[in-house]
Amino acid sequence: MKNKTLQILFHHEKNNIASWSPEINYPGVRIQEVVKTDNPHYLILYVNVSEATKPGIMNITFREGKRTMTHPYELRAK
């Protein structure tokens, strides 16, 4: 993968997504930074992707206490 850092914007109308903790469990991918905006319905993730990472669907899991929600994200070859 050519681009090493991805910026992913999340929006959730019903939940204050900024209070949830994101996790990624995908080989070669790690969360570099989590940015909370003034609006709690938005969250920005900066994700570091190694050059050896293979394309595929990675799941981004958000946790708040015992609650979880998962968002699939497609990594494409560039």
Image (cartoon, grey):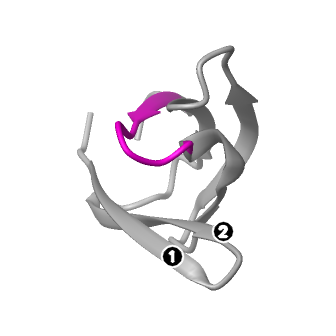
Mark 1 belongs to which amino acid? Thr
Circles 1, 2 touching at the beta carbon (< 8 Å): yes
Q: Which mark is residue 49?
A: none
Q: 3 above or below 76?
A: above
Query: How packed is label 2: few (under 14 Cα within 10 Å), some, or many (20 or more)?
Result: few
Q: Extreme top residue here? A: 38
Mark 2 belongs to which amino acid? Glu
Residue at point 71%, 77% (across, down): 65
Residue that numbered label 1 is attached to: 68
Q: Position of residue 7 (x, y in %)?
A: 51, 26
Q: Nearer the viewer, residue 45 or 77?
A: 45
Q: Position of residue 24 (x, y in %)?
A: 57, 65
Q: Position of residue 63 (x, y in %)?
A: 62, 70
Residue at point 59%, 49% (across, down): 50
Q: Which quarter shows the N terminus? A: top left
Residue at point 54%, 72% (across, down): 27
Q: Position of residue 9 (x, y in %)?
A: 45, 28
Write the start and end of the magenta stretch as one range.
6-16
Residue that numbered label 2 is attached to: 64
Q: Extreme bottom residue here? A: 66
Q: CA distance from mark 1 to mark 2?
A: 6 Å
